[in-house]
Amino acid sequence: MTVMAPPADPFEITDEPVPADPTPARRAVASMAHLEGLNDEQRQAVTHTGGPLLVLAGAGTGKTRVLTTRIAHLLITGQTRPSQILAVTFTNKAAREMLDRVASLIGGAADGMWLGTFHAIGVRVLRRHAELIGLKSNFTILDTDDQTRLIKQLLQAEGIDDKKWPARILSGIIQRWKDRALTPEKVSADEAGEFAGGRAADIYRQYQERLAEVNAVDFGDLVMHCVTLWQKHPDILAVYHGRFRHILVDEYQDTNVAQYLWLRLLAQGTQDVCCVGDDDQSIYGWRGAEVGNILRFEKDFPGATIVRLERNYRSTPHILAAASHLIAHNEGRLGKTLWTDAKEGERISLRGVWDGDEEARTIGEEIEALQRDKHRLSQIAILVRAGFQTREFEERFITMGLPYRVIGGPRFYERQEIRDALAYCRVTIQHDDDLAFERIYNTPRRGLGESALRTLRLIQRTQKISLFEATRRALETDELKARPRKALGDLIRNFERWRAMLDGMSHVEVVETILDESGYTDMLRVDRSPEAEGRLENLKELINALQEFDSLPAFMEHVALLTDMASRDDTDMVSVMTLHAAKGLEFDTVFLPGWEEGLFPNQRALDDKGLAGLEEERRLAYVGLTRARKRAYVSFAANRRVFNQWQAAIPSRFLRELPPAQLAQSSDAGLYATYSAGHHGGLRDQASGFEYESLGVTGRRTRYRDETADDRRATEGDRVDLSIGQRVFHQKFGYGLIVAVDGNKLDIEFEKAGPKKVLDSFIEAA
């Protein structure tokens, strides 16, 4: 028997045979200490030798341990050499951790093993065979900025308006095509759509040709080129078939189409394919992940064995039971039920509150109580569905002096779109704010380049005046060319008009006007990038924040103080992040706010993908619940302020999918019924729908279900007739007089709480 000699270069492929190394024989009888502590299912997955294997690993079931131990087992038992193993992860961090774990299990480095991300392994393959795809081996990998600049050049060369059809958006479209392994010739007319007048596919073709000319690739190419290489050159593919006897893939549920094809081509050479993943945690459909890849594993690999890891080592029985009951409502899943032999622990807290501010206050108080009980803040997380939700929590925590950090993104007032909007506000209030003026003088684009800015700076320095005043004086001369003179003239006049508006209009309306008339909101509306919608939502949340202050200067002072207070450096901090960013993390205590229809499940996801979107949202809820080890708090508000308008919020449909036995339910006084025997807080899980009773209006009942037109008419018919000057009662704010009526929204001067805008559904005649 002969085996392949390990080459000096671990990525070199050689056919030179050498006598078999006796070491594997000795390893075969070596200690099986690496198997100690594994449960039966984990051990089955680690030692499996009967063909393709899918490890369905639920949250907190030890999937990383299984994957690394399986690699170690293959080496310890002498079944293979490191160079014959290909292990694919999704992040460089995960790859490093896996390599370290394997090394600790086998008692040394696994030299020669191919372990890395799809992209990292793609680079190694393409460097070796670059000439077959029209490149040199020293090709450059372009970053996002380089990609955008190259596409912009192509658009301009074709006479396509890059302001109407931004290069950044087309870059995103091209990357999505590459995620599906669509080369330019495979992009259909329907796929191309109307972008750039239907010429997007042609620009894509030119883009790929230009990349080849400059000997460069982008990240999408690293996988797509491998697929193309192996499809066109089966002899090259056969070399890799001979090299890799064992293929292991982590987080298989997150693979896109190109990665799926990449794996399927490589897997043709071996029956030892092991994919680890969780179909219930597939939450990245918006960036190309295909949950169908894991769902059809048995079809793709006939005779495959499925091992379900269901024993959870993270969470309490209440949390697991609730999460399992929730995810069971999804139809597109392979099915598993998490369990634990841990102690029962606390039930999930489900709380209804009046509004978002009350939600932030309540959660802040709960965290303070945990802190007094010596609970580490670093083991507390707030997981939100959308980035704009962090604002209320950030402000509350800063006011309380509670240290926090935003993971996966900047703090609310540090986000680009918020800084831009605040810069407009700063210049409106104070024309001499040079830093703010310079930030937005060409945002959105007004055709103002560095040449115009240099002219303004020269005037500023020589005359020792502000940039704003320098601009005003430049407009009176011929220092500027016609186009920038007009653009700057319009901008200066706008700022002067907006400042004058502050004397006669609400500051909230003025800021809305500024964002609209400046073109900033339109800039985001035409932006088709995945981030654009979130940035618009953040601007809406900024408008909401403005309403809490009497004037724009007062709000700006508030923001400045918040920003200063947020700069403190603490190591023990509450983590605030989106549900997407939380995947793979775990905390002792998790707060899950904003479980309301339209917010969670997200309405945009439902509109775009229908049932598939709903199921992915439910998987996101499942991920959120299973991040908690000991405690989980779910909350929803009866009212949300959205872009200067109060809206009644409907509890999320996911709440009625949580089992009452695992819940401890409560609510603000007068909002919903409190817990009583046999009646879980007025929130009853019935076939007819999720029901709650309002105690504020005698005899009034609102039932959560899919509302029909008849339901809406009936509700509207039940409303109490209210008029200006009428004395009314509100459960939270007490007695007051109606001063204005706008549809279902009332302006009321409360005797103790002062002026408030409320919905008529929470008012009764006094």
Image (cartoon, rainbow, N blue to C red):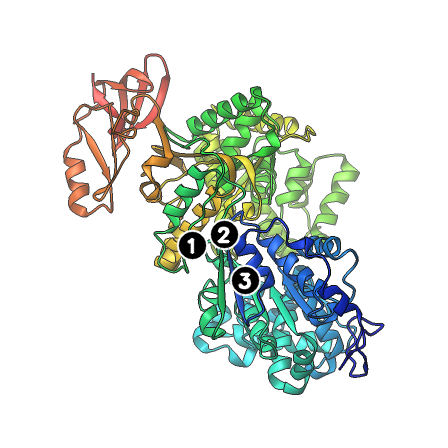
| C-alpha gap between disc 3 and disc 2 | 13 Å
Q: In this view, which residue lies farthest toward the top? A: 752
From the top left corner, tell me how far across and down residue 155 is, in percent. Answer: 59, 70
Upstream in sequence: badge 3 or badge 2: 2
- Labels 1 & 3 near each other (Cβ < 8 A): no
Residue 528 visible in the snapshot: no
- Labels 2 & 1 near each other (Cβ < 8 A): yes
Helix, strand, or loop for circle 1? loop
Helix, strand, or loop for circle 3? helix
Upstream in sequence: badge 1 or badge 3: 3
Q: Which residue is mark 1?
A: 336
Figure check: 237 above or below 539:
below
Q: Which residue is mark 3?
A: 252
Upstream in sequence: badge 2 or badge 1: 2
From the top left corner, tell me how far across and down residue 428 is, in percent. Answer: 56, 34
Q: Quadrant of the C terminus?
A: top left
* Label 3 vs label 2, nearer the camera: 2
Q: Quadrant of the N terminus?
A: bottom right
From the top left corner, tell me how far across and down residue 79 is, in percent. Answer: 69, 70
- Labels 3 & 2 near each other (Cβ < 8 A): no
Q: Which residue is mark 2?
A: 58
Q: Nearer the viewer, residue 721 or 384?
A: 384
